[in-house]
Amino acid sequence: MLTWVEIDSKAIEFNLKQFKKMIGKNRLLMPVIKANAYGHGFLEVAKILDKNKDADIICVVSLDEAINLIDNNIKKRIMILSFFEFEKEKIIKAIKNKVIFPIYSFDYANKLNEIGEGVGKKVKIHIKVDTGASRVGVLAKDAFDFILKVKKSKNLEIEGVFSHFASSEEDFRYTKKQKQIFEKIILKLEKEGAQIPIKHMACSASSVLYPDTHFNAIRLGLSLYGLHATTKSKNKLELKPVLSWYTKIIQIKEVPAGTKIGYGGTYITKENTKLGILPVGYWDGYDRGLSNRSKVLVNGKKCPVLGHICMNLCMISLNGVEGVKTGNKVVLLGANKKNKTAITTEDLAKWADTINYEVVNRINPSLPRILK
């Protein structure tokens, strides 16, 4: 095994506990594991959550992800956040396993109602309202009438209503506006006697920055994995990074000054250079934008990446690293505990001119995820 990812299960448990403490025991904590658990390993993380008392409902993006959890004996309740295909057998399987479906169109509602009638079971649904993110969701102006109409469906049970913030990391005014829109809808429903048990809108950032957005459940995304969506939240809540990413040196060679490195010769050595070759590239998720910008840890020393990152390889300078040999472990993302050096997700995001979400999400799912 030359390149792999390690997942710290204790860090996940620590982060869950931090949020449960913050929101209180009477609110639901709904961790999100869509998109291969933000690159951390879908089933690996699901199995940790399934055994954890602080996780109440596991959130996924699609029906296929929900079925994957059911097929792998995950017992916690599952909620689909965004979409599902009209594949009848899969929907029936999900209904029988009490999966929560998102609803934001009459077409979805009517078809689910028909399938529920066919199997003799009420389908639990959460209505998604678009309060300003302009993604999936029934428009806020239509939400009240939409919900009352869907409520008449005999085989649908509206268990929840939810929305999503567009800019809670940085735009307080817009966040406040979205929250007020959501609250008005809920208040209007309650005046009509339409009580909906679960109301959720808060993501990781809003949960930390704006306690009044908690309602009675929060969806825990990026921060489940020990990452902050904004620097504003770092001082408010301690989190532990979950993921470390490693590879090994497959070759070491000496090249003279003036040597061009990699495709296009975008780096030319300025001195005699001990060159290390690593079996990792943009196929593995080590972004090409990191070329000539990023660093890795070898024996606790930060070593620069030289030249363009290739599909399956990249090159580093090993100058100044003592005792280095072929086969030595290299830290692509993570810490060296002996000398307290680290390459953080934020480092990689800065070097690649992207966000920390994308850094971890793009780590190739085929790389082994090892639970620690």
Image: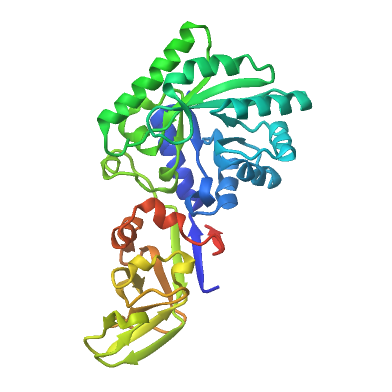
**Residue 351 percent location from the top left of the image:** 29, 62
When the figure is inspected, residue 72 is found, relative to residue 58, above or below; the finding is: below
Whether 339 is drawn above or below 44: the answer is below
Residue drawn at the location 58% of the way across and 15% of the way down? 149
- 187 displayed left or right of 292: right
Q: Can residue 147 be seen in this view?
A: yes
Q: Position of residue 234 (x, y in %)?
A: 29, 44
Q: Which residue is pictured at 46% across the width and 20% down the height? A: 142
User: Residue visible at 29% across and 87% down?
Assistant: 273
- Up-down: is 347 above or below 150? below
- Depth order, front residue of 184/141: 141
- State the image quarter where residue 255 is shown: bottom left
Q: Give whichever of 9, 194 is nearer the camera.
A: 194
Nearer-the-camera pick, 53 or 28? 28
Colouring scheme applied when the structure was drawn: rainbow
Q: Residue at x 51, y 62 (%)?
A: 364
Residue 184 in picture, x, y percent from top left: 39, 15
* Residue 341 locus on image (x, y percent): 30, 64
Residue 338 in sight in this render: no
